[in-house]
Image (cartoon, helix red, strand yellow):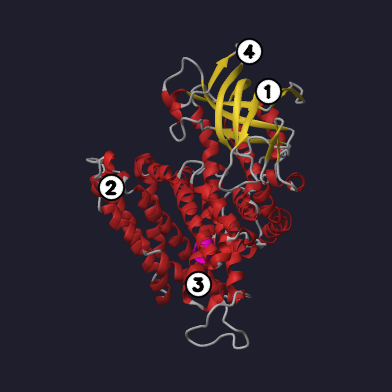
Amino acid sequence: MPSYTAPTKDMQFILHDVLAVTKSDIPGYQDLEADFTNAILEEAGKISSGVLHPLNMVGDTEGCRHENGVVYTPTGFKAAFEQVKAGGWPGLDMPEEFGGQNMPYVIGTAVGEMFSAANQAFTMYQGLTHGAASAILAHGSDAQKATYLPKMVSCEWTGTMNLTEPHCGTDLGLMRTKAEPQGDGSYRVTGQKIFISAGDHDMAENIIHLVLAKIPGGPDGIKGVSLFIVPKVQVNEDGSLGERNAVSVGKIEEKMGIHGNSTCVMNYDGAVGYLLGQEHKGMRAMFTMMNEARIGVGMQGLAQAEAAYQNAVIYAKDRLQGRDVTGVKNPDGPADPLIVHPDIRRSLMDQKSFAEGARAFILWGAMLIDQAHRGGDAAADGLVSLMTPVIKGFLTDQGYDMTVQAQQVYGGHGYIEEWGMSQYTRDARIAMIYEGANGVQALDLVGRKLAQDGGKHVMAFFDMVKSFCKDNSGSDAEYDRDFIEPLKNASKDLQAAGMYFMQNGMKNPNNALSGSYDFMHMFGHVCLGLMWARMAKAANAALADGGADAAFYETKLMTGRYYMARRLPATALHLSRIESGADTVMGLDAAQF
């Protein structure tokens, strides 16, 4: 059976050595002293490894059941959910006035990685509730906040988002679900939604569905979409539960992975709903939840890669297979451990350098969200908006690839369910699809985000990289060679790709769109390159100060050198693909496929 150990030491390094959270002027960050954050992370790590992870394979093998209109979660899930609720974890970064602990989002993100790595399917129940609560917090009336948020923050009630319908996925303008006004401020919602994660279950007494629907007579397409609060059980004026609403589960989807999460077909048969936000502005309200969810999904890619990597390392050190070509390393045994072989090392270094770079990237992204939301920083808001499709698309693509590499380390055992490695691969696969498939993330990045606000956010990113390289070069030749120069080269590749889009995208938009996926991955690599340069700087500083754990910092430097030398040069390949244009991509007629 696989194991999981929370990477709390690495998180502390990123929070304090790299991001220097206590030196930030973001409100609330002055309280994030190392002892305080360590206590939170250690406790979350204990729950992750001791409570959630033992249920990971249980959820995978049992799945959820739909019997007589009731959805049952796997054995142990309900008791674990009670433990998570009792610890106040669902409301870690939610406002105190609604029962939360008002900690910064960056802390919630670090805890979320541990929980997701330990048991992604389980953690989605509270994760989706957090997103739904955030949407109500941002767009709800005072009465709606008072009615729903205290119970959702505590996860006494959970939440969902209902977007997709059988005939429309990304193109939500095609939706048919309708909401008929009733004259008393309520609506009757009728339609069917599919792929609804945590759509129904037995762990909460009520489920608050956020449902996209069209009000008759509104504008066509996406401009006519509104967002509604549709509770599973209606809520009385005094906050008590009333009658069961006209919403039901059609079935639980049979999926490739995340079996422990109840992905439902939801039927709305004139269910009572309440407008959230303004009429015909549903996408604006929904995107509050979706943008948060996309950051969370990027974190899931990292989390599954980390958990898979940990087990691959254990196996590689334990499994005896072949002899080291440079000389026997295990003379008392029949063979040497797998980890002596260069190709196994290559695979493990790919995984390690990705996971640690991705962790820094996503915590930096979470810090930008705090800077925007807590500090009112418009520049940070624009930068994280630019980064959101990169975090979601790049980290989930790469995270999935790393789970495959971890599985490969096991050889044939990686394909056998009892070893548990295939679950990481299967669970990671969905992250590339939901909350906007990764191809759509790439189109969003190139088609919308690059030009947003006149392109000032991407230019700010380039200036940030340029300034970092300028400010940190010249004093250490080895650091310049190993980190600054590779980062400069990769950033130049990214800028060249952006220039290609400007020069060729207007006359033929396909020249830009056919290169969008490569651009998203280029951007991701440059971001991880920047993170590794920042981590290497922090590690060098700690070593120069005579830090207590020299081995940790030396390992960090070696891992960073690997990424810069072996992973970051992928930007040149992506640039070459982009500059080849659209002709080869679009050359065949549809009939020729």
Between tags 1 and 4, which lies in front?
A: 1
Indicate the amino acid at tag 3. Answer: Ile
Quarter of the image for the C terminus: give it: top left
For mark 2, what is the residue? 585
Q: How far apart are marks 3 and 2 (CA)?
A: 35 Å
Tag 3 and tag 1, C-beta contact below 8 Å? no
Secondary element under disc 4, as helix, strand or loop, is loop
Looking at the image, which residue is at 62% across and 59% down?
420
Spot occupied by residue 373 in the image (x, y as percentages of width and height)? 55, 42
Viewer-proximal residue, 28 or 169? 169
Q: Are marks 2 and 4 in contact (CB under 8 Å)?
A: no
Residue annotated with mark 4: 184
Per the image, the residue denoted by label 1 is 245
Q: State whether residue 189 is above or below residue 78.
A: above
What's the CA distance linking mark 2 and mark 4? 54 Å
Is there any visible trace of residue 288 in the rendered image?
A: yes
Q: Bounds of the magenta span?
A: 352-356
Classify mark 3: helix, strand or loop: helix
- Residue 102 placement: quadrant: top right
- Return the disc, 3 or 4, that comes first in the chain's sequence: 4
Q: What element carries label 2?
A: helix
Q: How far apart are marks 3 and 4 (CA)?
A: 66 Å
User: Residue under circle 3?
Assistant: 344
